[in-house]
Image (cartoon, helix red, strand yellow):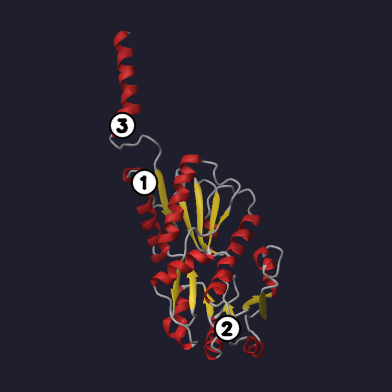
Amino acid sequence: MQLLKILQSAILIFVTTIIPSIGLSIERPIILTTLNKTSTLNQELLEKTNQFLNTKFSHKHIKFSGNGLVNHQTYQLIVGKKELDKISEKAALNIISYITKLECEEYISSHPLINNTICIQFEQPLKHYINLSKSIYPERKDIITLLSDTHITTKETDLYCYLNEIKFIYVDEKGALNLKELRRVLGQDSVFIMLPLPGLYNQNNIQEILINSYHKKTPVIAFSTSLTRAGATISLHSSTEQIAKQIANIIHEHYTLKDTFKDKKILEPDNFEISTNERVIKSIGSIPPDKKDIVRIKELIR
């Protein structure tokens, strides 16, 4: 009996002190999975999330699921609107990214019983776009953006907060805009902001906005590097690395605190990048910002 007690004490000491000290884990593993195994974006997001998680947990603690099976240990990365139907109630947490705030709200409102899902909205907060415009183009008082009737809802509270500061150009159900009205409002006193609202932009109206803004020497603030390359003056966007870091932080917080996201289903991006098109900036008579300017601008618009 005495020997048994000694053995039990020794095992307890080993489990509580020796194992943690040598970096092993007896806790349940974190299982990471993504649905689309062929998508470059999905794989990049998965790999970068794993890299950030390895700074918080032992790499032996993190496993990957390639068979599509989901259980209570699985943290499932849902990338884009097309993967929403794969959300699982069995997962520890479904983390949605590359989806707009409005799309997140629509999904959550139509699935009120699913409580293991959190969304990182694709777009930056509207105030960032407004503050960016005011910080780099303070002399331009007219802020213009595109909108459709479907986006004027009570859900669009951010837009309602800026109704007195923004001029709206409306498109029809096919995305066609009034070119005459667009050309009338563009000019030396205006800035055009492209907001990533779902179903708003198409190839035709993007081209019309960028070409006419260029001819009218009106800066365009957009939301992706591809739009910057296409002719937007400057864009705000989160990189894959920044989103992956935020996902890793979410997983770490959920794993350690469990109910931390019970009341908050939609999160804004933690961080963002600024991309610029120097050729277009020079064409409207401005000086392209250098790296120090970018850092200063990021601090001003937060």
Q: Is residue 71 visible?
A: no
Residue 32 horizontal side relative to residue 206, left or right: left
Q: Secondary structure at mark 1?
A: strand
Give above or below for 90 relative to 283. above
Q: Residue 23, percent across and down?
A: 30, 37
Compare marks 3 and 2 and give the one earlier in the sequence.
Answer: 3
Residues packed near mark 3 inside 10 Å, few (<14), some (14 to 19) or many (20 plus): few
Snapshot quadrant of residue 200: bottom right
Give above or below for 82 relative to 235. above
Residues packed near mark 1 inside 10 Å, few (<14), some (14 to 19) or many (20 plus): some
Q: Secondary structure at mark 3?
A: helix
Residue bearing the label numbered 1: 62
Q: Residue 20, percent across and down?
A: 33, 33
Residue 205's label in the rendered image is 2
Which sits in the foreground, 298 or 154?
A: 298
Q: Amino acid at mark 1?
A: Ile
Compare marks 1 and 2 and give the one earlier in the sequence.
Answer: 1
Q: Residue 7, percent across and down?
A: 30, 17
Q: Amino acid at mark 3?
A: Ile
Residue bearing the label numbered 3: 19
